[in-house]
Image: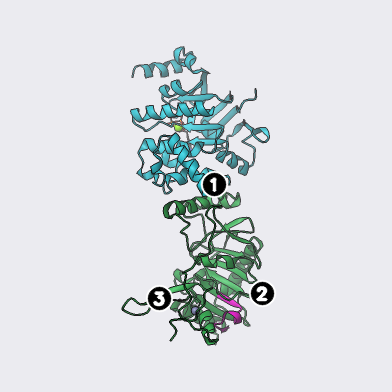
Amino acid sequence: MTPLLSVQGVTKRYGAHIGCADVSFDLYPGEVMGIVGESGSGKSTLLNCLAGHLAPDAGRVIFDTRADGPRDTVTMSEPERRMLGRTDWAFVHQHARDGLRMGVSAGGNVGERLMAVGDRHYGNIRDKAIDWLERVEIAPGRIDDRPTTFSGGMQQRLQIARNLVTGPRLVFMDEPTGGLDVSVQARLLDLLRGLVRDMGLSAIIVTHDLAVVRLLADRLMVMKSGHVVEAGLTDQVLDDPQHAYTQLLVSSVLQV
Amino acid sequence: MTDQAYNFAYLDEQTKRMIRHAILKGLAIPGYQVPFASREMPMPYGWGTGGVQVSAAVLTPDDRFKVIDQGADDTTNAVSIRSFFERTAGVATTTATAEATVIQTRHRIPEVPLSEGQILVYQVPIPEPLRFLEPRESETRKMHSLEEYGLMHVKLYEDISRHGHIATSYAYPVKVEGRYVMDPSPIPKFDNPKLGDCAAIQLFGAGREQRIYALPPYSKVVSLDFEDHPFEASKADHPCGLCGSVDSYLDEVITDDAGGRMFVCSDTDYCETRQAQGHRGKDAA
Ligand SMILES: Nc1ncnc2c1ncn2[C@@H]1O[C@H](COP(=O)(O)OP(=O)(O)OP(=O)(O)O)[C@@H](O)[C@H]1O
Ligand SMILES: [Mg+2]
Ligand SMILES: [Zn+2]
């Protein structure tokens, strides 16, 4: 089987400082990959390189496109990359305000990607927005309200709806539950797990919360100082960590 | 009488060349916003310094110049700009649309169809149609260059969701020659159909924002809309009270202290010409 995403030797430096170094892995359709590691270990840097928001200094990021099969997204043209960004890829930011248009209604937020790919029928756009609000458990009656009137958890669910409405094949998430109350986190995780299963989504989830990867990720990569120090099936890595750093990470969580 | 303290039409020749260069580039790429080094003009920005600079760059001594402000030739703004060019360029002026070779306008397109050889110069306050939803200039520039215009429809979507119909009635966005989305300046959407397939050259100048853009004659100009909410060039559903016209864009004016009101043509030259031809509306004296 062709990997949906094949990451080969991705390196990103900030001046002399290492963001992430020589990261390689394959992600197959329907798989969820978790990336964990302490603050500053390079998780966001790596994710942004994979999603085309940052240009890596070295390495290849091969995505299996619908039209032309595997293509290196690092070297493809910017219009092509941005097109992927609004169709086959989705990006869920930690802070909903980075991923939503706060001055636009919930319906407009969900509808934007539809309009971006050429939907010009107001009734259709509205119906799809209502459907997606329901799928992320937001009352359809809130469709004309702005996200500023939503709670943090609702904003995050709206961001997810806005991203998934065009049926992307690969979802990038950077700390999607960060900054939310624990009970709100649990509900969001439940929802994400349901959506990933129902839609057969492939996803890469960055988090420092091992409970999140335990629940969502099939596979896990552990990062430290920009390098991947351990990778494997999630349960294996968490239950039988091999690298000393992973052992520390796992034990520190268990003590909480 | 040309005031000899100034070069013809106030601006120096080098500045005019720079502006003409921007105009030619704009004409070559219809609807594309060309940056230009806007100069200080001896009037406030709100008075259309972008339009004034464009007019200064295209006027020749043989031109006949007309200025309208919301359709009228006699507002303070229109009178000031007209006398500015009478003084600095010594050009002839007129209020008759058909006789003018260069028309500077704020907020209207004349009712009488323009003809080949005429130039219509618009005063533009905000040239960027995407600004409303995307304030970052770096991002809007990228959206134009990559033709990413979904956001324009988000604006119209918001309109319908809030008002039940597209309530945008001024500065209604258009797509030019199937490529660039353009703000036609705050003309009423009633005027939008006149933008396309127009015999005259249309030039747009934004002074504070330092942008010039253009529509060459007979450009294809389409007002954005949805399949189930098509564009409509609406106006008040009345005949003109003075000349009886049923086709022109109307202003509602208060006529007395008792709250009396009537609808009259916003294009004063059009209305007066019709009255001179003997047309009468129900409120005509
Ligand atoms: N724009 C930048 N300029 C310079 N250095 C940066 C920049 N962004 C990140 N870094 C550095 O690169 C390293 C990796 O940062 P990154 O943000 O990828 O870590 P992270 O694992 O996502 O951390 P966190 O969990 O705090 O979000 C850190 O040392 C960081 O200080
Ligand atoms: Mg991070
Ligand atoms: Zn009239």
Q: Amino acid at mark 3?
A: Val
Distance, label 1 to label 2, CA atoms, is 38 Å
Q: Chain of mark 2?
A: B
Discs 1/3, front: 3
Near mark 1 (Cα within 10 A), the count class, few <14, some 14-19 or many ≥20, is many
Image colour assigned to chain B: green
Dividing the picture into quadrants, the one containing residue A80 is top right
Image colour assigned to chain A: cyan
Marker disc for residue A115: 1
Q: Chain of mark 3?
A: B
> Where are the magenta residues, as a range?
B90-103
Question: Disc 1, ligand 2: is the CB inside 8 Å?
Answer: no
List x then y, in percent, for residue B82: 51, 80
Q: Chain of mark 1?
A: A
Can you identify the residue that label 3 sits on? B253
Badge 1 marks a residue whose secondary structure is helix
Discs 1/2, front: 1
Q: Residue furthest right?
A: A68
Q: Amino acid at mark 2?
A: Glu
Asked whether B93 falls inside the magenta stretch, the response is yes
In the figure, B220 relative to B133: above or below? below
Residues under numbered marks 1 and 3 in contact, where contact means CB atoms less than 8 Å apart: no
Badge 3 marks a residue whose secondary structure is strand
Distance, label 2 to label 3, CA atoms, is 34 Å
Can you identify the residue that label 2 sits on? B116
Q: Quadrant of the C terminus of chain A?
A: top left
Between residue B27 and residue B240, name the one nearer to us.
B240
Q: Is residue A57 visible?
A: yes
Between residue B84 and residue B144, name the one nearer to us.
B144
